[in-house]
Image: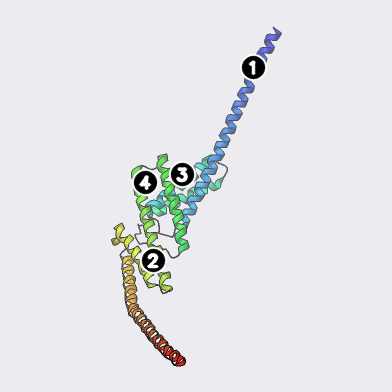
């Protein structure tokens, strides 16, 4: 009987040990998953907040701004539930909730924001790429449907085209400062082409008017410079012809002198 009890006790202890190890592993796995989720949410919140502050005021359409605020609110709401002892998550949740309410209360501003430097264009280009990838992730998770994705993506495409227009306009300014009117004209026509292809000329009347005016000014300067170039070229041809004639005369004289010496 004693051996039976010992075997039974051993089996019970082994079962308890296995159960304890299984529970411990399950708890550790949950802790690791929770820590991983917290890190992922913190990273998302940081990137979204950095992106939101990185765009110039009124550059993004209101729909996209509201979407970013909603994602920030959802992110810090989850963090506040996972980390109940950290009040900063709840504070950020309240801050972004107020920001979204303010964005919704503001009237839609259709005035276009012009970018002022190549560095600013580069920074915003990176933010737009991140935002495009983020939209793809939201679609994959089912947070937004395909119709919403198409709506947001069309806005990002328009912003990308506007950014290209600003980039060409800045390149044209640099070319003009270097007195390269033909190169400036090339960049301005590329900017004009993008606006006309987008079919949004009615939304960019001021900019297309300015670009057309600058194109006209460049063409006038090029037209004024061409006669001077022609005159200089003709002058060089005349000088070359004169030099050639003088050289022929010199050779004839030299031949006569040689003949006189031999005689």
First reached walking from the N terminus: tag 3 or tag 2: 3
Between the C-alphas of marks 1 and 4, the distance is 57 Å
In the picture shown, does residue 180 fall above or below 54?
A: below
Q: Position of residue 58 (x, y in %)?
A: 40, 59
Secondary element at tag 4: helix
Q: Position of residue 64 (x, y in %)?
A: 39, 51
Q: Which residue is mark 3?
A: 74
Colour setting: rainbow
Q: Are marks 3 and 2 in contact (CB under 8 Å)?
A: no
Identified at 33% across, 65% down, the residue is: 189
In the picture shown, does residue 81 fall above or below 250?
A: above
Secondary element at tag 2: helix
For marks 3 and 2, give the one nearer the viewer. 2
Q: Which residue is mark 2?
A: 169
Q: Which residue is mark 1?
A: 12
Identified at 38% across, 72% down, the residue is: 181
Q: Which residue is mark 4?
A: 149
Query: Left or right: where does residue 23 sit relative to residue 143?
Result: right
Query: Which of the pair 247/21 is nearer the observer?
Result: 247
For marks 2 and 4, give the one nearer the viewer. 2
Q: How many numbered discs? A: 4
Secondary element at tag 3: helix
First reached walking from the N terminus: tag 1 or tag 2: 1
């Amino acid at each position: 009987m004693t051996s039976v009890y010992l075997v039974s006790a051993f089996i019970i202890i082994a079962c308890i040990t296995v159960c304890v190890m299984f529970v411990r592993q399950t708890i550790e796995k949950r802790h690791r998953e929770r820590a991983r989720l917290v890190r992922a949410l913190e990273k998302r919140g940081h990137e979204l907040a950095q992106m939101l502050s990185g765009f110039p005021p009124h550059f993004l359409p209101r729909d996209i701004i509201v979407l970013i605020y909603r994602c920030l609110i959802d992110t810090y709401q989850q963090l506040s539930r996972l980390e109940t002892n950290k009040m900063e998550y709840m504070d950020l949740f309240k801050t972004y909730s107020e920001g979204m309410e303010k964005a919704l209360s503001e009237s839609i501003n259709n005035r276009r924001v012009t970018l002022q430097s190549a560095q600013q264009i580069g920074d915003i280009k990176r933010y737009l790429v991140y935002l495009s990838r983020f939209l793809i992730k939201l679609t994959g998770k089912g947070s937004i449907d395909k119709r919403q994705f198409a709506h947001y993506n069309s806005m990002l495409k328009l912003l990308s085209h506007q950014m290209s227009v600003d980039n060409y306009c800045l390149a044209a300014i640099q070319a003009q400062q270097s007195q390269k009117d033909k190169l400036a004209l090339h960049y301005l026509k590329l900017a004009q082409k993008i606006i006309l292809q987008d079919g949004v000329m009615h939304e960019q009347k001021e900019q297309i008017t300015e670009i057309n005016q600058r194109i006209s000014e460049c063409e006038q300067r090029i037209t004024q410079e061409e006669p001077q170039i022609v005159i200089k070229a003709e002058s060089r041809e005349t000088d070359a012809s004169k030099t050639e004639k003088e050289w022929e005369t010199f050779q004839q004289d030299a031949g006569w002198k040689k003949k006189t010496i031999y005689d």
